[in-house]
Amino acid sequence: MFREPKFLVATLLLMLLSLPAAAQQKPCFTKEARAAAERTAKVWREPDPAYDPVLGYSPDKGPVKGAPEVDGAGLAKPFKCIANKDPRPGSGTTPKFHCSVEGVADEDGELIGHKVKPHFKGQSKEKRNGEIYGEFLSSRFSKALGFFADDEWVADVTCPDCEKSLTSGFQGADCYRAIHARGARSVIPPQVRARVRGGPEFLDRDAAVLRGREVGRDEWKKEAGYHRRSLAETAMMRLKTIFSDKLKAGEWKRQVTESRVRCAAMNRMTSLGMPQSYAV
C-alpha cells in the first residue's frame, strides 16, 4: 500500500517558513524600472491650456532646450549645423540627416542632436515634399490635444558635411532592388530631371519617368495611386508618433493583438475628431 510522504511535506514547509520575507516576495521590477515603464506606456496627458501650436511651445514655459528660434508666425529661422554620424540603420524611402548646432548642448555637455528630413527631395522649392508638412502639423495638433509627440519644425537647414550622415541615398538603387525582389510595385516619384536607368529592378521607375514626361507628374500620381500610398505612410507616422515605434509585447501573437488595439484606438480618435459633413 502506498503511503503519502508527510514528513517530506513538513520539511518543505519548514524550509519555506525559514526563508526571509524579502526572498519570498522579491519584486519583479525596481521602482525606477516600473516608473520608466509607466512613462513609456502613457500616451495621453491633460493638455496644457497655454500650449501654442503655432509656436510649438507654451509661452509661459518657453521652447525646449535646443529648439530652433521661431518668429511670431511659428516659422523656424534658418540655422547651420554640423553632421553627426548615427550608427543606427535608416528606415523609409526619404533620406534623413543627423546633425547638431555647434555650441548648443544639454545639461551633460552633449550636443543636442536633430534628425533632419529634407523637404525638397532634390527638387526645386516649388515642388516641396508635402510629407514633411503633414508630419509637422500632426505633431503640433497631437501635442495640443494632450498626446505625446516629437517636437518638429520646418526650417531651412545648412549642413555642408551632412552627406556623410545620410541614413539612405537619394532615390537610391537599393530601395528599387528590394521592392523588385519582393515582387512589389514601386510608387516612388522620380526626381524632376530623372533619366531612364534600364534594368529589371527599375522598370516601374523608368515607366514613371516616361509617363511623367507625357502627362505630367501630378497626373502620374493620380494614375499610379501615389496619394493612397502617401495616406498610408502618413497613417503609419501618426501611429508611431502617438503609440511609439516599438511594441511592448514579446510574443508574436501578442504583438499582433497589440497592433490591432493600437489601430482601433487611432481609428476611434480619428472618427471623434472628424467633422460631420452633410450635403446642402
Image (cartoon, rainbow, N blue to C red):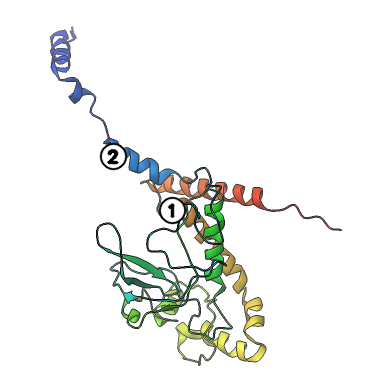
Q: Which residue corresponds to the image point at 68% horizontal and 53% vertical from the top-left?
A: 274
Secondary structure beneath label 1: loop
Q: Which one is nearer the viewer's eye here, 34 or 179?
A: 34
According to the picture, the residue beneath numbered tag 1 turns out to be 244
Quadrant in the picture for the N terminus: top left
Image position of 165 (left or right of 135): left
Q: Is residue 63 above or below residue 26?
A: below
Q: Say few, some or many: other residues with alpha carbon within 10 Å of mark 1 (under 14 / 14 to 19 / 20 or more).
A: some
Give, as a three-letter code, the residue at label 2.
Glu
Crowdedness near tag 2: few (<14), some (14–19) or many (≥20) residues, C-alpha within 10 Å: few
Between disc 2 and disc 1, the foreground one is 2
Which residue does the numbered mark 2 point to in the structure image? 32
| Foreground residue among 162 and 48 | 48
Secondary element type, mark 2:
helix
- Comes first in the chain, label 2 or label 1: 2
The residue closer to the viewer here, 146 or 211, is 146
- When the figure is inspected, residue 217 is found, relative to residue 96, above or below; the finding is below
Q: Position of residue 218 (x, y in %)?
A: 65, 81
Which of the labelled discs sits on residue 236, or is there none? none
When asked about the image quadrant of residue 17, the answer is: top left
Q: Residue 159's image quarter?
A: bottom left
Which residue is painted at 67% across and 88% down in the image?
Answer: 215
Q: Is residue 114 left or right of residue 179?
A: left
Residue 150 appears at what percent x and percent y?
45, 58
> Residue 103 at x, y = what percent?
29, 70
Is 253 or 61 nearer to us in this picture? 61
Disc 2/disc 1 C-alpha distance (Å): 20 Å
Say if 221 sits above or below 268 in the image. below
Which residue is most to the right?
280
Q: Is residue 12 left or right of residue 37?
A: left
